[in-house]
Amino acid sequence: MRFSKILLTLCVANLAGLAFLAPAASAEDLYATSISGSKINKVNTNTLGVTTLLNTPSAADSLIFDGSGRIIYTQLYTGELRRFDPVSSTDTLIATGFNEPADLTLEPGGHSVLVSEYLGGKIDRVNLNTNVVTTLLTPGLTPEGLTYDASGRLFANLGNRFGGPNGKFVAQIDPVTGAILATSAGLDSLDGLTYDPYTGKLFAASLFGNGVYEIDPNNLTSVTSHFFGQLNTPDGITSDGIGNIWIANAGDAHIYQYNIGANTLTQNAFVSGLDDLAPASGLGSFQSTPEPGSVVLLMAAGLVAGGIWRRRRSH
């Protein structure tokens, strides 16, 4: 048994070295789309460095990660949903025929995504295994941001972007039937939407109100406004789950950091043509995808530990 412990220690140590060889995404990384630049970028929020991952066929709007670390993204003006594999550098068409597909969310289980059709007035479900597209609901007008919270409730920004200060609202939607279960009061020009596990709240960007709403998902009636007039057409929005909300401020093409605890808003990296940010935590985030080296490490350590356990049971 002493030899087995030594073997396990050496195996884990050596495989940890192998895991280091796999490129790892870290907490300071964000992923962003550029509409005018037709790009998907990786952004380091510490160094403010921006690296192009993919020159997209046309204007890239929204992006998420699937369970294999591939990027699912929308092509706004060509009506496409596509998948980019950063390991093989392959970019493939998943589905087409959307009327300005805007925002995305990965669904629990990771086998499907929801897509909001900005001009189509629909929210569609796309099966990532079969590429089959079905319509979940047709609320009309300009649906945009989509997100699931930690308990599996689905929320979307519905209404009319150009309907004035009360033109849009956050809706809770039954993910099976598409029924609208609850709505917030009218809010100003909602675009991106995210769930923040740090506070348990929803955060929505107000494109023309130039600020951010914080909304209680339990009732949708408790709404707090942040930094209105201090941003410039904020579009995409995401939470890192550790106390920060990151905002894609399209007006000046900078990412902004809202530190919740300190209640501060800080300008971060410049991304030309900035539109949206991938989820930084939870469903569809790069951090929910195990690194290849980490998977190997866990599997090998599990095999060794499993062998030790079986030998112990045999005595």
Image (cartoon, rainbow, N blue to C red):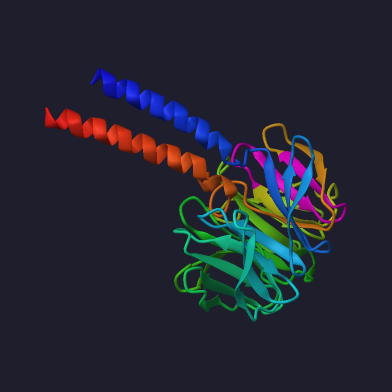
Residue occupying the far right of the picture: 252
Is 143 inside the magenta-drawn segment?
no
The magenta stretch is 239-258
Q: Quadrant of the N terminus?
A: top left
Q: Is residue 165 left or right of residue 63?
A: right
Q: Main secondary structure of the magenta part?
A: strand
Picture residue at 63% right of the left edge, 71% below the top: 81
**Residue 303 location (% of width, % of height):** 32, 38
**Residue 179 location (% of width, % of height):** 50, 73
Judging depth in this view, the residue of 160 and 300 nearest the camera is: 300
Residue 196: tell me if it is visible: no
In the figure, residue 192 lies in which quadrant?
A: bottom right
Residue occupying the far left of the picture: 315
Picture residue at 77% right of the left edge, 67% below the top: 59
Picture residue at 79% right of the left edge, 71% below the top: 162
Residue 119: tell me if it is visible: yes
In the figure, residue 161 lies in which quadrant?
A: bottom right
**Residue 6 location (% of width, % of height):** 33, 20
**Residue 313 location (% of width, % of height):** 15, 31
Q: Is residue 119 left or right of residue 16?
A: right
Q: Is residue 153 left or right of residue 9?
A: right
Q: How many marks?
A: 0
Q: Quadrant of the C terminus?
A: top left
Picture residue at 47% right of the left edge, 56% below the top: 152
Is 243 inside the magenta-drawn segment?
yes
